Amino acid sequence: MVAALLPDIWFFAAATAVTYVADWYLHQRGSYLVNRLSKVRAGLPIRFLLRQLMVILLLARLDLAEEPLFYAAVACFLVFYGLQAPHGALTTLIRLRRSLPIVTRNVDLHAVRIPDAPPRALLHRAGEKMLHLDLPAVAGVLIAAGTGEDYLGYIGAGVTLLLAVGYNALLVPFLRRSRRAPSASAALKALDTWLGEYQPTVVLYFSGSNESAYQGNMWLDTMAAVEGRPLIVMRERNLVSQLADTSVPVVCVPAGTHLMNMDLSTVRVCLYPANVGKNIHMLRVPTMKHVFIGHGDSDKLASVNPYSKVYDEVWTAGRAGRDRYALADVGIRDEDIVEVGRPQLAPIESWTGTTRNPIPTVLYAPTWEGWDDNPGNTSLLLAGENIVRRLLTADDPVRVIYKPHPFTGIRSAKAKAVNARIKALVAKSAQERAADPRWVKEASAAAAGQSAAKAELVRIEARLAELAKPGRAGGDESEESRVALADPARQTEISTLRAEWNDAYWRSFGWWEHKTVTGAQPKLYDCFNQSDAMVSDISSVVSDFIASGKPYAVTDSAELGRDEFKRQNTAVRAAVILSNGAQEIDELLVAVADPSADSLAEARHELKTYLLGPDEPTSMEQFNAAVQALAARAEARNAGVAQRVGEQIAAPLPDPEAESSGVGDGAQEIVAEVEAAVDPDGPSPDADAGIGAGPSAIR
């Protein structure tokens, strides 16, 4: 605007270029500023319109307001904006008509025809691309104004309008019926047809926020090994792409009404890894038994949530989970708790009593800050930097692996800042160690191997990217649902490549190098296996690490005191307890360096059994036994209900001449029997209180 008012055409051209580049950069980075600008009515279309308005102002200030170029520019920008409406309508209609009410993986939807998706280039960030077609017009007008060659402005305007019309024309064919996805009813009918053929028996039901995919991913291997016909039911579309590879059929059903109309009559056991509101849509199904399995086993309050009363059973890893509910007294009956071990812990390697490398590796894996400001939620805020500094400056060198929780910083800006400072500490110390003469020789000797490992990582990642999504590149959800069928050979190759990737990753840097590990790979358990000890907080991370038998430390961030901290938290009974100053870290390092000085070894062994259950039978065997036992209970319940309801239907109608009191008594008896059938463990305590539920129950 300043350049236009001066007027200075070259200053204006430079400022215009900066605004284009700035917009492109913000969108490429996914900057939150883009969203903020939209909230204050400075969204992308407005920014482009203002830029074009400034071009018109510049022409006026250059005394060109009576020239044909001025009118040509005004007409071009008006027509160009007129073409935005059909473009927006076309892209919206195409997306709507390409959208299925479900997203599936490993489900055969051959019963409906799903055509190929439009090229990704047409629909990905379509609005942004359309707006940028004004570039030829803006550039042409500016050059024409600066040189006096008006025809250049006309050419630029013509190119812009031609491209805009062409873009719209390219979209029109994708509105044809042959290019649309099947209707919602057809897709849902095809899904029910497949369900009738597959007849799932065990469902993992998962819903959550965008950051919670790990809660479902941790159960994928278990579901693949479960006896029966497993199915994964999800509720959020955005989580499907975050789901790890699995051979188990996956169905994402965002709408509650569609889920409630799905044919799940063959399902006998439904497993829930998280307590979320959308669970109610599945909990309402009486023909299956509902089980809370959680996404970790810890002494956090989330592990004894009163919401768990809605489930038929609560499955815990070991005796500790049962005792935890008893102490919390939140209404979970002891007979409804089943100990099944932790099948996910199979990849964790047991400690041999010696360090993997010449110097010990200590993993710092704090949990996140939680939804409130309780200082006991995480060690990160009060102790994190102290822990890392003491490890980095220990008298005898150790390697530090820092793996923050995926949720770190999503609620607390302070936690986000501390996390950034710890990452900086680790990076700085890694750089200093690389220049330390003590490690130069090691680095030189390992350089060739590390280079080879890095090249191997590139090769593996490229192949994994090829295998990531079946079908052609650029397909949308509907097309991926059509082609994403389980391929045993592909699954085997992916599994092999991931194991190779993990091995190459740890070889790509020295065993003495400090490292911050984020993202889905390498997994937390891979970090366990590379470490000789761990520092963490009250979370399932501690319970899982105990499976390794290695020394560990837990921070008393709330400063309860050693005895009270141990009394309240079972998982720390065999831990080195750290204060927020982390002065006690040397106790952990001594236990790692000298097994004879490890006074907590026997306590860790006993705690492992208490928390995670016995080693025999295996956790997977225990899990399968629990599934089969509960499925049998569901079958018995369904058979009983069918029999009793059938008997009531076959019973003769009451005599019309019977006394009203007798009829009422008979109705009450029917209601009591039907309610007892709904709850095979015993009649409802309200069975004799009234008959309001009677007609509904009979229906």
Image (cartoon, rainbow, N blue to C red):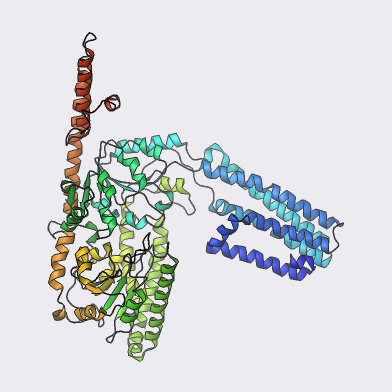
Up the image or down, 296 lies above or below 227; here it is below
Residue drawn where x is 36% and y is 42% of the image:
108
Which quarter of the rendering shows the N terminus?
A: bottom right
Q: From the viewer's perspective, is 268 left or right of 614?
A: right
Q: Position of residue 693 (x, y in %)?
A: 28, 28
Whether residue 632 is visible here, answered yes or no, is: yes
Q: Quadrant of residue 47?
A: bottom right
Residue at the extreme top: 657
Up the image or down, 334 lies above or below 549; here it is above
Whether residue 295 is visible here, answered yes or no, is: no
Q: Position of residue 194 (x, y in %)?
A: 34, 38
Number of marks in picture: 0
Residue drawn where x is 78% and y is 53% of the image:
74
Residue at the extreme bottom: 437
Q: Position of residue 12 (x, y in %)?
A: 74, 67
Q: Position of residue 367 (x, y in %)?
A: 33, 65
Q: From the viewer's perspective, is 74 left or right of 562?
A: right
Which quarter of the rendering shows the C terminus?
A: top left
Observer-nearest residue: 77 or 305?
Answer: 305
Q: From the viewer's perspective, is 291 left or right of 423?
A: left
Q: Quadrant of residue 283?
A: top left
Up the image or down, 189 lies above or below 498; here it is above
